[in-house]
Amino acid sequence: MPHTPADAVTVRLWSLSEDVTVEHDEGHDQVVLKSRWGTDCVERPVPEVREALRRMELGPVVLANAADQHFDLNAVMLPVLDKLSHLVVHTLGADDLRGPLLSVFPVAQDALFTLVWVPDRRAVRLSRGMVLTRLDSGLSLEAEDSPHRVVLHRPEAALVMAMLAWPVTPDKVKAALPLPLQMTESIIRFLAAAGMAPPVDDDTYDAV
């Protein structure tokens, strides 16, 4: 079992796929992103958006670090990233200095990633046809009906994933594993948002 501090807190990180290059025009009228999907443009970006995209090209970042405390992240930054969702890698980190827990990579141009609230007593299960591959960086999860690929970087994420091989509710997963409750909950939410852990019944999640 991994030794994880009981007070470890998860952190949401954002980056751009490795094949994405970011070009800034001298007039600051637009930012051009080039990738395997072609070219995407962000017109008339505010400085905070330009800075966030610059940092995201270098690796995972906390978006709030690219702006001052008065910047409305939800109103300005997130709509831009939603339009660029096929270029964005979503990483779940922790504040324990042991590296990220998992990362969600887009593998289709229609890859939308929206974190959802998974009710504690709503049974979930890994998607059918899940393919598990061992990598040097961890374990890779792919499903034929998901536009994402998930890489589990740490044993904590793999433990949660293993619990979802059978229908199980999040409250039972949290009770069974020796992990911080918030960490277990966040891993399940990321897997659900990536299309890897749908509900067992036909109900839908409540988006947050």
Image: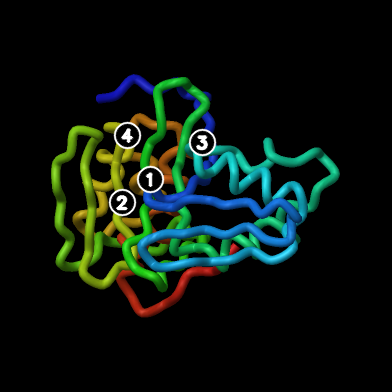
Query: What residue type is disc 4 on?
Result: Glu
The first of marks 1 and 3 along the sequence is 3
Image coordinates of residue 45 in percent, x first then y, are 72, 58
Residue depth check, mark 2 versus mark 4: number of the one nearer the observer = 2
- Amino acid of disc 2: Val
The answer for how far apart the CA atoms under marks 4 and 1 are is: 13 Å
Mark 2 vs mark 3, CA separation in Å: 17 Å
Kind of residue at badge 1: Ser
Q: What's the amino acid at mark 3?
A: Thr
Q: Give the crowd class for mark 2: few <14, some 14-19, many >=20 residues within 10 Å.
A: many
Which residue was labeled with disc 1? 103
Where is residue 145 drawn, in percent x and y? Answer: 26, 72
CA–CA distance in space, label 2 to label 1? 6 Å
Considering only order in the chain, which callout, 4 or 3, is on the residue closer to the N terminus? 3
- Name which residue lies at 27% across and 32% down: 155
Label for residue 10? 3
Report, in whole angstroms, how far the alpha carbon at label 2 lies from the one at label 4.
14 Å
Say if mark 3 contacts mark 4, CB within 8 Å: no
Which of the two discs, 2 and 1, labels the residue nearer the N terminus?
A: 1
Disc 1, SS:
strand
- Of the 4 image quadrants, the one containing the C terminus is bottom right
Q: Is residue 197 visible?
A: no
Residue 108 appears left or right of 165: right
The secondary element bearing badge 2 is classed as strand
Classify mark 4: helix, strand or loop: helix
Q: Which residue is tagged 2?
A: 150
Q: Nearer the viewer, residue 111 or 206?
A: 111
| Residue at 47% over, 24% down | 6
Q: Residues within 10 Å of mark 1 (few under 14, many from 20)?
A: many
